[in-house]
């Protein structure tokens, strides 16, 4: 092959290569533009969809506003069509105002009663009701150093539950013993009659165990003890207050499920409280027991159960 032929061949190869590169570059550009066009078309479709959504939302909002305006107009028409004006119940309003005033007065009276209570250290207060050894440290730990502070700390309701949760007084009889003593110091419990005679004849008061045995319910002595009613004197004392025993107490705190037994025990308790109040208890026959149980007795009859009441 001659030199001229070789040169001619190389030139053709170069031209073909250049043409191939140009075609390849054009194809790449075409593909890029096609992708861009497709992306733009998708954006246009999305914008049209958003435009339609906004249009639908505006139509819906206009419809709601129209309905709301119609409801308001209907209400206005109903109001205008009323022939009479609803009268204000003045009697009920007066009763409500009176109740508010009464509550305010009661609160003020309660505060004045608390202020009139004679200051007493918490140790002395608990000692008087036989609970110093059990709960003195509970009150000291919570910075309750006297009876007035204790009274001020109590809520107006659920006081027994508060004594349990706040101060750890875990037995119903002890909770009520504390509350009754506070009531007595505020003058809410009269010492005439029952309490007066109870103090006068306290040396002749039996134990809880002896009393239950005398009425044939000695099997419930552990129930009374666990409920905090371990002293017959304080059992009678609480019956003079607002913290009297009831059937629900026997079920919830004494765990006595036999309602008949509970009713009989309450009946015996009512009778003896009445006897002590009227001093008839001590004017009846006296029987001599053992040295530990030397006290006066009286016989009474209840349905199907003859019992001895101390």
Image (tube, rainbow, N blue to C red):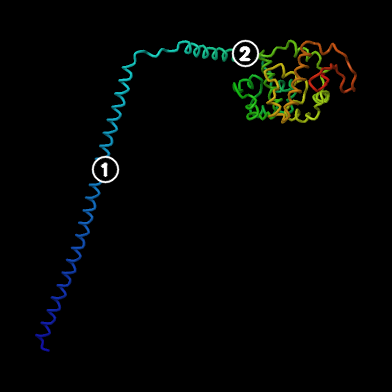
Q: Which residue is mark 1?
A: 53
Helix, strand or loop status at disc 2:
helix
Which picture quadrant has residue 158? top right
Q: Residue furthest bottom?
A: 1
Outermost residue, left direction?
A: 4
State the mark number for residue 113: 2
For disc 1, the neighbor class at 10 Å (few under 14, some 14 to 19, many from 20) is few
Mark nearest the camera among 1 and 2 is 1
User: Looking at this view, is 240 or 267 the one in front?
Assistant: 267
> Is residue 255 shown left or right of residue 75?
right
Q: Are marks 1 and 2 in contact (CB under 8 Å)?
A: no
Residue 188's x, y, as percent?
Answer: 66, 14
164 to 13, vertically: above or below: above
Where disc 1 sits, the SS reads helix
Alpha carbons under labels 1 and 2: distance apart: 72 Å
Say left or right for 198 vs 21. Answer: right
Task: Pick the quarter of the image with the C terminus.
Answer: top right
Residue found 25% across the figure and 45% down from its top:
50
Percent of width and height locating residue 293: 86, 22
Q: Nearer the viewer, residue 160 or 130?
A: 160
1 or 2: tag closer to the N-terminus: 1
- Relative to 258, does residue 277 appear above or below in the rendering? above
Instruction: Identify the residue at image location x=29%, y=27%.
Output: 70
- Residue 252 appears at what percent x and percent y? 68, 29
Q: Is residue 213 above or below residue 49?
A: above
Task: Name the residue located 79 percent from the left edge and 19 percent from the top edge.
Answer: 302
């Amino acid at each position: 092959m001659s030199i001229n032929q070789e040169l001619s061949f190389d030139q053709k190869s170069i031209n073909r290569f250049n043409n191939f590169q140009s075609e390849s570059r054009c194809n790449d550009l075409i593909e890029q533009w096609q992708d861009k066009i497709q992306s733009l078309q998708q954006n246009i479709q999305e914008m049209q969809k958003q435009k339609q959504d906004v249009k639908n939302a505006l139509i819906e909002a206009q419809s709601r506003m129209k309905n709301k305006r119609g409801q308001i107009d209907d209400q206005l028409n109903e109001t205008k069509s009323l022939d009479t004006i609803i009268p204000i119940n003045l009697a009920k309003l007066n009763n409500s105002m009176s109740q508010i005033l009464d509550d305010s007065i009661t609160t003020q009276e309660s505060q004045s009663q608390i202020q009139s209570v004679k200051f007493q250290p918490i140790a002395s207060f608990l000692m008087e009701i036989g609970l110093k050894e059990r709960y003195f440290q509970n009150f000291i730990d919570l910075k309750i150093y006297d009876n007035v502070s204790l009274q001020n700390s109590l809520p107006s309701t659920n006081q027994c539950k508060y004594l349990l949760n706040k101060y750890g007084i875990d037995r119903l009889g002890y909770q009520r013993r504390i509350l009754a003593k506070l009531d007595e110091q505020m003058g809410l419990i009269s010492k005439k009659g029952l309490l007066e005679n109870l103090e006068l004849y306290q040396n002749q008061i039996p134990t809880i165990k002896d009393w239950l045995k005398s009425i044939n319910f000695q099997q419930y002595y552990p129930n009374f003890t666990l409920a905090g009613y371990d002293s017959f004197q304080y059992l009678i004392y609480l019956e003079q207050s607002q913290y009297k025993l009831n059937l629900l107490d026997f079920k919830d705190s004494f765990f006595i499920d036999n309602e008949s037994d509970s009713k009989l025990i309450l009946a015996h308790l009512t009778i003896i409280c009445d006897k002590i109040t009227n001093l008839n208890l001590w004017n009846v026959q006296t029987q001599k027991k053992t040295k530990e149980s030397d006290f006066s007795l009286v016989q009474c009859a209840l349905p199907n159960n003859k019992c001895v009441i101390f």
